[in-house]
């Protein structure tokens, strides 16, 4: 690996910045390590740093052609007909966790019953869905930490409808970050639960197979968006934002998606949100044909896909909403210990509060302990204490569902 120390006045588009001359937390950059895509990136680097470290192997001059510069779109411009608000945490982790647990339990049971009935041929009970999402929206509005923790747990569970549940929680968390009003959070919650409902009409063997699908089989799987639209239509639901999420959550920013190959602003804004949360929840969950990847790796994938698959501004807001290390993420510390992120991952991206589960030898600790990485900066030997990496959900055989806070 060729790492070069470069004065910021000599930086060019396409260079990959692997290190700064100051801590990442002192800059507005979301990730440790990124490619310079725009003139705005260059200006920000020059503003905060005198020099940076560039990985020449990851740098690419071709990047200039791949991602032309475009002005950043403000949140208000994304939602011109909405009056956005700023949410603040009105409860802490200890207060919110039992309420979030009850909310997600109600949501889980409600969704399971609705989906089971629909799979048997009954119409979707949208009234039940609406009633089920309300406590979850309340909890995320107060403080999203606990619900996001529980969304991560559901990716550990064999819960039948974990993807729909997770997508709903991620969507509301992003809506909160964007400052959307309660009515829109409700639409995001319902749309997140229902955008894949059409898969109930697709042969489960096709959805779960590990082999490559034939062209006809692939078309049938894609038809889940058509089936979903039909199922929503049968309910009489008139919420255009929910319908857009069901119909267009597989459209892509560059026009490569389906069913209509829409691109950019032609994709309804709520469908653009659905596309991001659908992708994130899927790749961080175990599926029949792919293992889950760590949250930080998933975030980097989304970041690399901005203005290709997903709108850049929404990707950046999503990263702010869920953090690089979301609550419930297993991480390895520089001390060798294994811990799980508990809280404050949004405002303190790289130094959240964590709970230590395994010691440096990867053996269970006798008493789990909370470590505030913002205050505790050194390990027992006096060496810097940092997060080295995030891990797959079941690393070292840890059963997240057995953890009690």
Image (cartoon, grey):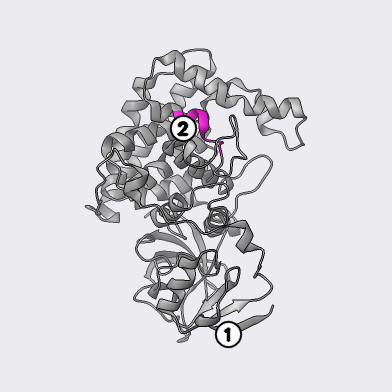
In front: label 1 or label 2:
1
Picture quarter with the C terminus: bottom left
The image quadrant of residue 398 is bottom right
Q: Is residue 250 shown in magenta? A: yes
Depth check: give the residue in front, 39 or 198.
39
What residue would you read off at disc 1? 5
Name which residue lies at 41% across and 78% down.
48
User: Where does the image place residue 17, in percent across and percent down from the top left?
Assistant: 56, 73
What range of the chain is rendered magenta? Answer: 244-251
Badge 1 or badge 2: first in the primary sequence: 1
Picture quarter with the N terminus: bottom right
What residue would you read off at disc 2? 245
Q: Is residue 7 shown in magenta? A: no
- Calculate the distance from the C-alpha at mark 1 to the C-alpha at mark 2: 45 Å
Q: Which mark is residue 254?
A: none
Q: In the rendered image of this protein, does residue 103 appear above or below residue 92?
A: above
Left/right placement of residue 98 relative to residue 252 reads: left
The image quadrant of residue 11 is bottom right
Name which residue lies at 43% across and 68% down.
350
Neighbourhood count class around disc 1 (C-alpha, 10 Å): few under 14, some 14–19, many 20 upward = some
**Res. 166 in view:** no
Neighbourhood count class around disc 2 (C-alpha, 10 Å): few under 14, some 14–19, many 20 upward = many
């Amino acid at each position: 690996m060729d790492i070069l120390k470069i004065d910021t006045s000599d930086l060019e588009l396409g260079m990959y910045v692997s290190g700064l001359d100051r801590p990442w937390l002192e800059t507005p950059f979301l990730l440790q390590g990124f490619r310079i895509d725009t003139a705005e990136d260059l200006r920000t680097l020059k503003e905060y740093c005198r020099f940076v470290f560039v990985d020449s192997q990851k740098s690419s001059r071709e990047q200039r052609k791949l991602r032309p510069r475009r002005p950043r779109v403000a949140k208000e411009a994304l939602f011109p007909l909405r009056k956005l608000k700023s949410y603040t945490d009105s409860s802490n982790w200890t207060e919110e966790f039992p309420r979030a647990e009850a909310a997600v339990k109600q949501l889980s049971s409600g969704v399971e019953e609705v989906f089971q009935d629909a799979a048997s041929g009954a119409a979707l009970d949208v009234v039940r869905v609406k009633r089920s999402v309300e406590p979850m929206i309340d909890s995320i509005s107060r403080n999203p930490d606990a619900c996001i923790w529980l969304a991560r747990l559901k990716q550990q569970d064999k819960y039948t409808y974990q993807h729909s549940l997770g997508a709903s929680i991620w969507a509301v968390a992003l809506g909160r970050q964007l400052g959307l009003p309660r009515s829109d959070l409700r639409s995001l919650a319902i749309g997140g639960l229902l955008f894949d409902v059409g898969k109930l009409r697709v042969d489960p063997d096709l959805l779960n197979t590990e082999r490559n699908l034939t062209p006809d089989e692939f078309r049938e799987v894609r038809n889940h968006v058509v089936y979903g639209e039909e199922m929503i239509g049968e309910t009489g639901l008139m919420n255009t934002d929910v319908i857009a999420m069901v119909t267009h959550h597989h459209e892509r920013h560059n026009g490569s998606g389906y069913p209509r190959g829409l691109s950019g602003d032609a994709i309804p804004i709520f469908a653009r949100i659905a596309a991001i949360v659908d992708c994130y929840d899927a790749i961080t969950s175990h599926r029949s044909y792919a293992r889950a990847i760590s949250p930080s790796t998933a975030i980097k994938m989304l970041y690399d896909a901005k203005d290709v698959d997903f709108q850049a501004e929404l990707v950046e807001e999503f990263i702010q909403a869920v953090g690089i290390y979301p609550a419930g993420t297993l991480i390895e510390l520089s001390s060798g210990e294994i811990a799980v992120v508990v809280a404050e991952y949004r405002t303190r991206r790289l130094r959240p509060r964590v709970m230590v589960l395994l010691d440096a030898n990867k053996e269970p600790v006798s008493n789990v302990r909370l470590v505030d990485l913002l205050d505790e900066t050194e390990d027992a030997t006096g060496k810097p204490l940092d997060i080295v990496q995030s891990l797959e959900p079941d690393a070292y055989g840890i059963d997240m569902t057995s953890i009690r806070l």
